[in-house]
Image (cartoon, rainbow, N blue to C red):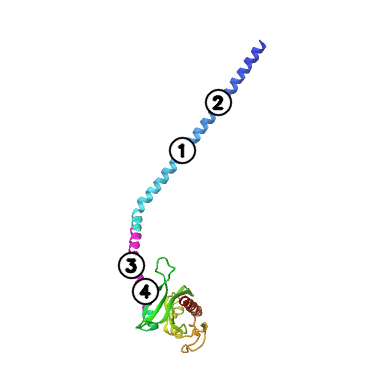
Amino acid sequence: MFQAQAAGFKGSGSISAFAQYDSIVNTFQKDFDQFKQSIEQEHRQFLNTNDSVFAKFLKDSWLVLLAALVFGLGCSGIHGQLKPRIEQNARDKIARELRVLFGEETTVDEVIDPADPDGKRVLYYKASQNDETIGYALQANGGGFADKIILLVAVDAEFENLKGIAVLKSNETPGFGDKIKNAKFKDQFGNCPMGQKLIVTKRGDRGVVDYRIVSITGATISSQAVVDIVNGGAERLKEIVKQ
């Protein structure tokens, strides 16, 4: 009897424990379901709100977006059509400048860089008259006072003297540094000896042909930049042609 009562007591306690466990699990599941529903509702509201904002944005700005797209495609197409002409104009300008430096009867040939996979990059230019090489030239650049300066540096066939320079691109300060384009400054480089590097001097006679280049008043930095570009360009040109 005692054993039966003990067994009965143990069994009823076990049932009570399971009942409490089920109650806790059910309560937790209920709370979790409510939390999940709340999160899902907030997520739907967020999507709806942002969809509305995006839809309003498209409605208000579709014409601007379309115009920008058409304009971009148009610019790309125009650039593609004009690119060959732009490149040809650049070549024609260089040829004209070289004829000024070497003479009107000069024939200009482009020497292409053999290392260029596209076969387009010009290594240097060869100037000829009556099938005889009279000189060489290349584009050289460096930093000026305001922006990059691009020059055409020309030398004679023996690399004894400079034939002169041409300014292909410059955005130096108007009234000061942009005077590097003026003949009064550029003509100093014509027939300068290549035996030693050119230097800049603030005073001197621009009519005297030697290694001294008289700077532009108020534009010493631009003047020095041009001299540095010429020195480096002439040296590089000699190395390229002689190799």
The furthest residue to the top: 1
Q: Circle 2 is placed at which residue position?
A: 23
How would you rate the neighbour count of disc 1 (Cα within 10 Å): few for under 14, some for 14-19, many for 20 or more? few
Find the distance from the CA under tag 1 to the CA under tag 4.
67 Å
Q: Circle 4 is placed at which residue position?
A: 91
Mark number, residue 163: none
In this rendering, which labeled residue sits more in front, label 3 or label 4? 4
First in sequence: mark 3 or mark 4?
3
The local secondary structure at tag 4 comes to helix
In this rendering, which labeled residue sits more in front, label 1 or label 4? 4
First in sequence: mark 3 or mark 1?
1
Identified at 58% across, 23% down, the residue is 18
Question: Is 92 included in the stretch rendered in magenta?
Answer: yes
In this rendering, which labeled residue sits more in front, label 4 or label 2? 4
First in sequence: mark 2 or mark 3?
2
How would you rate the neighbour count of disc 3 (Cα within 10 Å): few for under 14, some for 14-19, many for 20 or more? few
Question: Is 231 included in the stretch rendered in magenta?
Answer: no
Find the distance from the CA under tag 3 to the CA under tag 4.
14 Å
Mark number, residue 40: 1
Question: Which residue type carries mark 2?
Answer: Ser
Find the distance from the CA under tag 2 to the CA under tag 1.
26 Å
Question: Which residue type carries mark 3?
Answer: Leu
Magenta residues, start to end: 70-95
